[in-house]
Image (cartoon, grey):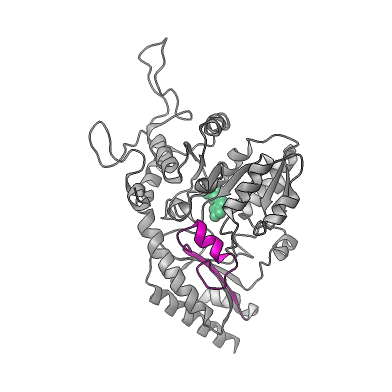
Amino acid sequence: MDINTRIVHAGIDRDPATGASSVPLYQASTYSQNDPERHGRYDYVRSGNPTREALEKALAELEGGAAGLAFASGMAATSSALLLFRPGDHLVVGRDVYGGTFRVLDRLFSRWGLRTTFVDTTDAANIRAAVEPATRAIFIETPSNPFLRITDLAATAAIARERGLLTIADGTFTTPYLQRPLEHGFDLVVHSATKFLNGHSDLLAGAVVARGAELGDRLKFIQNAFGAVLGVQDSWLLLRGLKTLAARLETGQKTAHWLAERLAALPEVKKVHYPGLPGHPGREIHARQASGGGAVLSFELAEEGMTMEFLRRLRLPLLAVSLGGVETIVTHPATMSHASMPPEERELRGISEGLVRMSVGLESGEDLLTDILQAFREAGRKRG
Ligand SMILES: *Cc1c(COP(=O)(O)O)cnc(C)c1O
């Protein structure tokens, strides 16, 4: 069935016992056993909970994987997936992966003997060149943050197959509505469900979906052993948010595309980064592996010195970290999403003071543009 239909009915779409339109919230930490010699399907909430399982089943179905696992945050999901590896292992990771992913690899997992080489994965030759005998996996994000750079999923999976490596994609920006990496040969998808999957900027959650059952079992073991599971209430809320994913992302990306075109024509804007725009590097690859440009864009101001005043003058969007909410969220990568990155790493990635990222919500595009135009006007006036 079509992804629109699957998003609404994925997993357990009604309560089998009562027909209730939502899965009940099983707010319990333990389960009474009927038979002391034969324990039932559930024993303790960290190991299993029907509400969380309904969510996990839905996520697995939408990504086309054998197993889905819900975690307390996107970073808990990514970190738990990284526990598949051991000291001495080496990873090839996209140079512009999420700042927190960079940080956990650079500052934490490095201390436990997991080595990482960060490369520009938009060119498959860079991935190939970075593979060592100890390499175990390739970890990418496409489109990446904040430049929406495109990595070829099928080409990356082909290199991994050749060298016997695991492939992991961070699917936060696209969600299974737009792109399903497992269909392109990837082994794992990780998500910050805090963003588009939930969509309402009101919870923190993460997910991992595995293509194969064996890998799914190993991750299930890690989920239970390490313990960074998603709470029951947030599982229920996320299931609720997930149902409107297609409608939210469709509207957001339509407005994002329209705004990207308008912004590109403004004298105050030097460059717009959006995978749906003609001339965006990797646009054809993206069109082949995803069904739309998504709802995130970024742009560079012609005058860097105007950035802070421009951001100060915006009235409609939230000026905040995070993305994927029903409300438009504007981020200043240099001081917000990528602030945890050392300045020289930021420079290497081209993240300048004049770069602004916008996650487009469900407001009217005209209203957003009007607000952007008045912010430019006011910032220009202030500057004289
Ligand atoms: C936010 C984000 C994460 C981290 O997720 P949390 O839910 O904040 O822990 C990982 N990857 C991407 C692409 C993100 O945007």
Q: Relative to residue 90, is residue 148 drawn left or right?
A: left
Q: Position of residue 281 (x, y in %)?
A: 60, 67
How far from the left and from the top, in percent, is residue 65?
47, 40
Question: Which one is nearer the viewer's eye here, 298 or 64?
Answer: 64
Examine the structure image and report whether residue 283 is included in the region drawn in magenta: yes
Residues in magenta, as a range: 274-302
**Image coords of residue 322 (percent x, y):** 52, 58
Q: Is residue 201 visible?
A: yes
Compared with 45, 55 (above or below) is below
Where 320 falls versus 15 (above or below)?
Answer: below
The structure residue drawn at horizontal position 54% and vertical position 64%, both measured from the top left corner, is: 284
Q: Is residue 82 left or right of residue 70?
A: right
Q: Is residue 124 magenta?
A: no
Q: Quadrant of the C terminus?
A: bottom right
Q: Position of residue 348 (x, y in %)?
A: 73, 63
Which residue occupies 45% across, 25% down? 44
Q: Residue furthest top?
A: 37
User: Picture quarter containing residue 344?
Assistant: bottom right
Which residue is pictured at 70% across the width and 34% down the height?
Answer: 86
Total numbered circles? 0
Residue 315 appears in the picture as rendered = no
Q: Residue furthest bottom?
A: 384
Nearer-the-camera pick, 345 or 283: 283
Between 15 and 90, the one nearer to me in the picture: 90
Which quadrant of the figure has residue 349?
A: bottom right
